[in-house]
Amino acid sequence: MTTAVIHDHPEKIRYPLVERPFVGFLLAFMAGSMNAWTLPNAQTFATVQSGNVVQSGYWLAQGEWDKFTFPFLSVMAFGLGSAFCGILMIRRLRKGQIYTPVILFLQAAMLIVLWYLAHMAVADPGAAVNAHYIAYAISFVAGMQGNAFHKNHGMLYGAVAVTFVVQMAFNFLVQGLFRREGINGEPNLMWAGIFFLTLLGFAAGGGIGFLVGDYVLQSGAILLPAAIALILGLVALKDSRKPGAVDPSAGGHFA
């Protein structure tokens, strides 16, 4: 199993790679960029499933089966991605192996294939893959990411969904107005900053992903998170020789 933390000194805690705030920013950036493609092309958020769940119930109650199918299958694709990732993580942990580089490389490979399909759809509309199918696959990738990477600086958070991050950012901001020290004796305002940095990642991924996809490279909003996953995977592979240096630590806490 993974080691909770690495202790270099009794007063200093070093968190694993995927729990570092800047990596949390990059993972959120990936999610925002993936949505920057699915929103204009498939009219949905591929990483945040709350809207799809609500739509599924709404259209089901209305008896609108055609409109019900897409959001329902998006939720199922996300869930299957999470389940697949869970199986992969368990198998590797049972063998004493880390899983972070494998998940990141799989994400990168799948997103590159999806970018190619989306790019070719623009080049040859007659042979285009339905945008909904690409959105399903992106939801699958997002499900993998959300299950594998769900901690930031020891705190549970959402790497693909923004609601909980907004809640915690403002929670710690308010707590910081009344009490300086928070969890682990670290400043509440520092915790607020970690979550606001993650929010910035979601927004930056959405904005930059849109600009890249529209003005730099066709469907680049899919290729951008693939590049980030590949780079993070290489960094994780380099650090994998150090015990507990890569995978998320066990457990977690809420404020």
Image (tube, grey):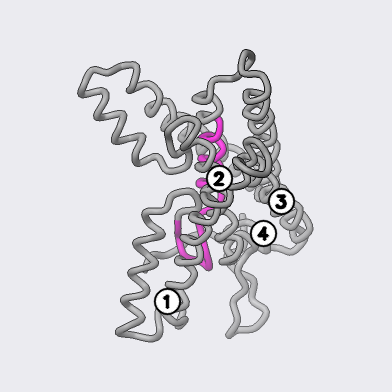
Query: Foreground residue, 23 or 42?
Result: 42
Query: Is residue 120 rendered to the left or right of residue 132?
Result: right
Q: Earlier in the sequence, mark 3 or mark 2?
A: 2
Q: Nearer the viewer, mark 3 or mark 2?
A: 2
Quadrant including the N terminus = bottom right
Left/right placement of residue 223 relative to residue 251 reads right
Check the image and report above or below for 250 versus 171.
above
Q: Label 1: few (<14), some or many (≥20) within 10 Å?
A: few
Residue at disc 2, secondary structure: helix
Q: CA distance from mark 2 to mark 1?
A: 37 Å
SS class of the residue under badge 3? helix
Give the crowd class for mark 2: few <14, some 14-19, many >=20 residues within 10 Å.
many
| C-alpha distance separating marks 1 and 3 | 30 Å
Q: Percent x, y for residue 5?
A: 60, 69
The local crowd at label 3, few if under 14, some if 14 to 19, many if 20 or more residues have their Cα within 10 Å, is many
Question: Mark 4 or mark 2: which is in front?
Answer: 2
> Which disc is residue 233 wearing?
3
Q: Is residue 94 visible?
A: no
Image point 57% across, 63% down: which residue? Answer: 19
Q: Which residue is mark 1?
A: 183
**Quadrant containing the C terminus in the rendered view:** bottom left
Which residue corresponds to mark 2? 210
Q: Which secondary structure lies at badge 4?
A: loop
Residue ID for mark 4 = 246
Find out whether residue 139 is within the magenta segment: yes
- Of labels 4 and 2, earlier in sequence is 2
Quick one: label 4 or label 1, which is nearer the N terminus?
A: 1
Q: Are there few (<14), some (14-19), or many (20+) residues within 10 Å of tag 4? A: many
- Mark 3 vs mark 2, CA separation in Å: 24 Å
